[in-house]
Image: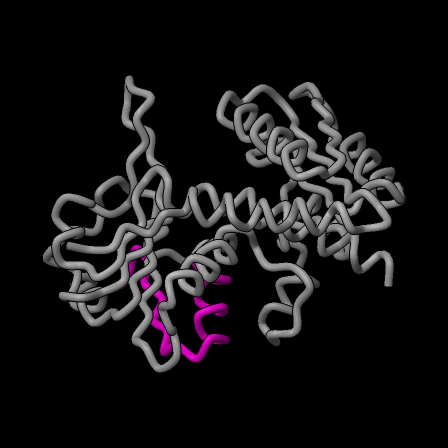
Amino acid sequence: MAVIIDGKQISAEVRTALAEEIKSMKTVPGLAVVIVGEDPASQIYVRNKGKACEEVGIYSEIIELPAETSQDELLSIINRLNNDPKIHGILVQSPLPKHISEKAVTEYISPDKDVDAFNMVNVGRIMFGDYDFLPCTPAGVMVLLEKYGIDVTGKECVVVGRSNIVGKPMAMLLLHAHGTVTVCHSRTKNLGEVTKRADILVVAIGKANFITGDMVKDGAVVIDVGMNRVPDSKKVIGDVDFASVEPKASYITPVPGGVGPMTITMLLKNTVKSAQKDLT
């Protein structure tokens, strides 16, 4: 039986510590979240981020814009936020309408306020291991491993998925922690053979129940980043087939309640870090 990694519990502990830290600060950290359009999932995420800010004592500004907002109008708002001393972190919620370039928006956010760590300056810093901010989901995974005493040093680490948001930065963080890292993707041959070598397996491919028990070695640590909504249901399932993988794993994250709660918590942590940097 695997140990179930409790992301809710760890997230609550980190938030409690952040709230205490904020109380002792001379400035109130501020986070601005911009949402363009009316994507229902995005609206839920944005509400959750606002609520999380309130819980720990971060000033939160939510800017809701209609879907027809032009790219220039959005960049103008980002420019205002870049220059607003109350705001220490800026996040533009994805997905954006098709007429707006996500890359242009990401690059327009000041690297000093880029608490998602998507700006190329911050991506480059992560490559060198000399960073201020880390992308929230991979950062959350590293905290979970640390809190459960799972040492990455010398371990065979396999990341399934190569997105700029999770897969690539996840691989870099495991590498910085002295893991031996393999990145798999849709064109990897004999995927099951590769995943079966993993001491630590991180799955972020966006396909429900994609990793099954026969693809995992006995005693592996399995981190499921996937969040797949079951059609015609409110239920969410991961990229890992929990029923067949859990009996083989030593540690495993559930979905929901594993990596998910850590993502917003790391966003809060990045915002606090940005505000602290502002004071130095």
Residue at image point 72% right, 39% down: 58
Q: Is 280 displayed left or right of 39 in the figure?
A: right
Q: Report the side of 113 relative to 153 (left or right).
A: right
Q: 258 above or below 154?
A: above
In percent of width and height, residue 261 lies at 46, 41
Residue 217 visible in image: yes
Q: Residue at x 33, y 52 (%)?
A: 5
- Residue 120 placed where, x, y %? 66, 60
Residue 108 locus on image (x, y percent): 76, 48
Q: Is residue 233 above or below residue 225?
A: above
Percent position of residue 196, x then y: 18, 67
Q: Is residue 110 visible?
A: no
Q: Is residue 30 above or below residue 122?
A: above
Q: Is residue 156 magenta?
A: no
Q: How is the image coloured?
A: one colour
Magenta range is 167-188
For the N terminus, the image quarter is bottom left
Closer to us: 12 or 272: 12
Quadrant the C terminus occupies: bottom right
Q: Residue at x 65, y 73 (%)?
A: 130
